[in-house]
Image (cartoon, coloured by chain):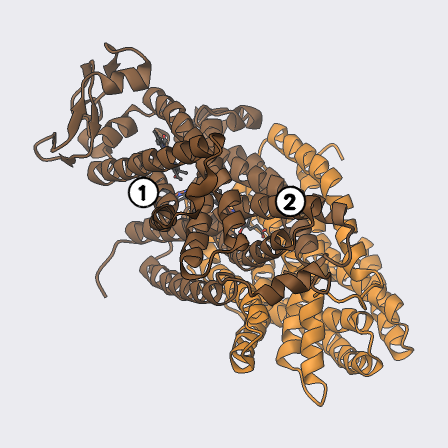
Chain colours: A orange, B brown
Amino acid sequence: MHNPAVLLTLILMVSLTFYALFGGADYGGGVWDLLARGPRQQQQRELIANAIAPVWEANHVWLILVIVLLFAGFPPAFAAVSTALHIPLTAIIIGIVMRGSSFVFRAYHTADYRTQKRWGMIFAVASTITPICLGVIVGAISSGNIVVKQGISENGFLTPWLGLFPLMVGVFSLSLFVFLAAVYLTVESTDVQLQEDFRRRALVSGLLVALMALATFVSARTGAPDIYSGLLKPSIVWIVQGATAVFACTAFLCLLARKYKIARVAAMLQITFILWGWGMSQAPYLLQGDMTVNDAAASPAVLWTLIAAVGSGLVLLVPSLLYLLRLFKMGNEHLPLH
Amino acid sequence: MIPMSDIFAARTQMAISLAFHIIFAVIGVALPPMMVLAEAMWLRTKDPVYLCLAKRWAKGTAILFAIGAVSGTVLSFEMGLLWPRFMGLAGAAIGMPFSLEGFAFFTEAIFLGIYLYGWRRASPAAHLFSGIVVAVSGLASAFFVCLVNGWMNTPTGFRLLNGQFVDINVWKALRNPAGTPEAIHMILASYCAAGFATAGIHALLALRSKPNQFHRRAIAIALALGGSAAVFQAVSGDALARVTAVNQPTKLAAMEGDFETRGGAPLRIGGIPDVQTRQTKGAIEIPYGLSILAFHSPKAVVAGLDQTPRSDWPNVLVVHVAFQIMVAIGSLLALIGLVSGWLVWKRRTAFTQSRVFLKVLVLCSPLGFIALEAGWVVTEAGRQPWIIYHIMKTSDAVTTMPGLPVTLILFTCLYLILSAVVIWLMSRHVIATPKDEEIQALAVGKGIVHA
Ligand code: HDD
Ligand code: HEM
Ligand code: HEM
């Protein structure tokens, strides 16, 4: 690890992974709110809201960390992405604003059920659109169309992201988050019927994930040829792919067997390996085909101080985060929040 | 649609987003210490009124913090979306405080979650401690972001070579001359603005209801924080002005409406600068005032706008007027803080019950926020045309993306709607006199309801 640029990239990937695992599931919860059906839809919505309420703001900070570390460590990459992907990024921030604010508005509109429902609708729709846009960004970065010279985007402001492949990645991300949320919710609920509701949802969305994974892979052939060939390279990448498959099957089987806690771990590992598989086939590029990690990196002195800052930040963060999870996610779900 | 240049749209969008965020950020900085104080009083006295107060304020914080978090996220993206060339050039130099701020956000969000939803899960001491962590992290995030802004005003810690930054030293960049004084001034401003606003709201409710302990204690806590901050604010503002005088003479000249360089410069109060005739008319002038304040010597020479080419002037009228507003409000609030402090010290606390005093508080409640926004206009508009002072022009930093007026309109509408909803929600759920039964329920311990 003598190359600080690589080390910082790994830190970025870790933050992104945490954002997907925690923040991603919060989006997925919003989608299940939108899709709440059947006799227990009211309880389903409450379960989702109670699962999200204490943690979503903390989960959201992972995204901020990704942004901040990106512009601190790799300023030209940040500048290029913000220029070429102006439109989908704007969509993301609007989505984030709508989602966060409608979530609190709904929580405090307890007196009036109709208004509450309306805010719930905005919350759910924003939770669906935002992760698609996040995926589009990832897809666009991989497809190699982001070329920004002297602050001018050579492919304009649409081509870099408006294509089948980025869109596929967008829907794929959504399916992952939706699956993850359903798996988490099986653990969160203390009511057996609710658990069954989410077990069924998890199984269906698990199949959807597999389908979308395949479709995304196929569309990468033309949409992101470098990634496509990267994913086929018989090397470490295969190990990652294999692990993804193993954990995906484990999660699925555990759901079938109603072993929810193990399914939760397996699903988290599945998502982690998907992300890292993408990261490895993307290496050494930060922006596929145009800018490598080393091209974009700030000077080593800057990077080392950043890494040191992250290190000392973690000393504060890790115990705090564990305490939060222990209070709200470790088997005391029966305690009321209110 | 009115034709509008992209650069103007970008600046306006940035200004609106910041002006919106700052209101919620200030509440994230200043409400936690107030709720912690109320909770600590409850733990000590076991008086349920304090618990009720802590919960009310926590409820307000919950709503406002969420809006602060999402509007802050918008800002982090907007730095790149609107000013990619600024971020590409300077990202490495200012990334450090932003990263540290990121960790402050983490602790703030984590412990706020625990504070709001952990009444039944954490022990009383752990719960109070969580509140303290929230208060400290809010303070830290304000500190770090002001270091960034200070760096834009007084950039340090690098060498400029062919338009690129080399030899960046992030610690030197952190210790830029304007950063720390700005941060202190900003943190005091948060306490001052939120303290007076809270005191004013409770005064309004107190005027409407029969005498009650709830509002009386709320006003005491809010005013203790806001009033003392206002007094220190004048001192810190003076220190900040001296940093400006040395490092950004053009900005100081615009603040004062000083067109000519001279020794023994007077301090102007009020007045309207006219850039055509290069005169500031209608101001009360205090002889030698400015020289004394800025350089501690009546004969000191203070640079006027004539030292700067006309094309590099900021909008003098805006900067001058905004500065006058801030200082006028600052002086008024400091006076109220001093008088109240003196009366309390003399144990003449009856004044807090008088209707006149309550009415004064109601009138003062928006003033802190107005001063705060005005102060930021001074800092930001006064830096123009530079985004990084004397290094990069704002017009060279803006994105090449066309059609920015569209996003400007989009965000303006979004923020207008959000503001309307927040005001409505706060007035329904937070700004109300609690019923006696609610306090009674808390007294018998039935109501450890979350905020
Ligand atoms: C409650 C709000 C508030 C109050 C009462 C005051 N200020 Fe202030 N002032 C701010 C809130 C503020 C701020 C938070 O808006 C600014 C913008 C940037 C900053 O760091 O603080 C600011 C900036 C600012 C600057 C600009 C520095 C620069 O950009 O170079 C100066 C010189 C002062 N202030 C001076 C004063 C003085 C002499 C006051 C006398 C009473 C005063 N302020 C009261
Ligand atoms: C002087 C100006 C500012 C102050 C005092 C300030 C302070 C704060 C505080 C206290 C919070 C916590 C949330 C809340 O209280 O509602 C917050 C949130 C945030 N701010 Fe600001 N901020 C300022 C300007 C900025 C700027 C310029 C940016 C970006 C470039 C920014 C980015 C953020 C982000 C990303 C969050 C969300 C954190 C979360 O999710 O918890 N802020 N800010
Ligand atoms: C939160 C309180 C703040 C308010 C209300 C505020 C207000 C403003 C205003 C009015 C402008 C437009 C200036 C003009 O075009 O005349 C502006 C520009 C800007 N501000 Fe601030 N500002 C705040 C804090 C900050 C902080 C803490 C940072 C840095 C981290 C920052 C970074 C910028 C940038 C990058 C621009 C655009 C470039 C420029 O116009 O110079 N602002 N802000």
- Under circle 1, the secondary element is helix
Q: Which mark is residue B24?
A: none
Quadrant of image for the C terminus of chain B:
bottom right
Quadrant of image for the N terminus of chain B:
bottom left
- Under circle 2, the secondary element is helix
Q: Position of residue B292 (x, y in %)?
A: 28, 15
Label count reads: 2
Neighbourhood count class around disc 1 (C-alpha, 10 Å): few under 14, some 14–19, many 20 upward: some
Neighbourhood count class around disc 2 (C-alpha, 10 Å): few under 14, some 14–19, many 20 upward: some
Inspect the image, locate mark 1, and give the three-letter code of the amino acid beneath it. Answer: Ser
- Of B74 and B318, nearer the camera is B318
- First along the sequence among labels 2 and 1: 2
- Of A53 and B438, nearer the camera is B438
Give the number of the mark in front: 2 or 1.
2
Q: Chain of mark 2?
A: B
- Of A27 and B65, nearer the camera is B65
Q: Which mark is residue B41?
A: 2
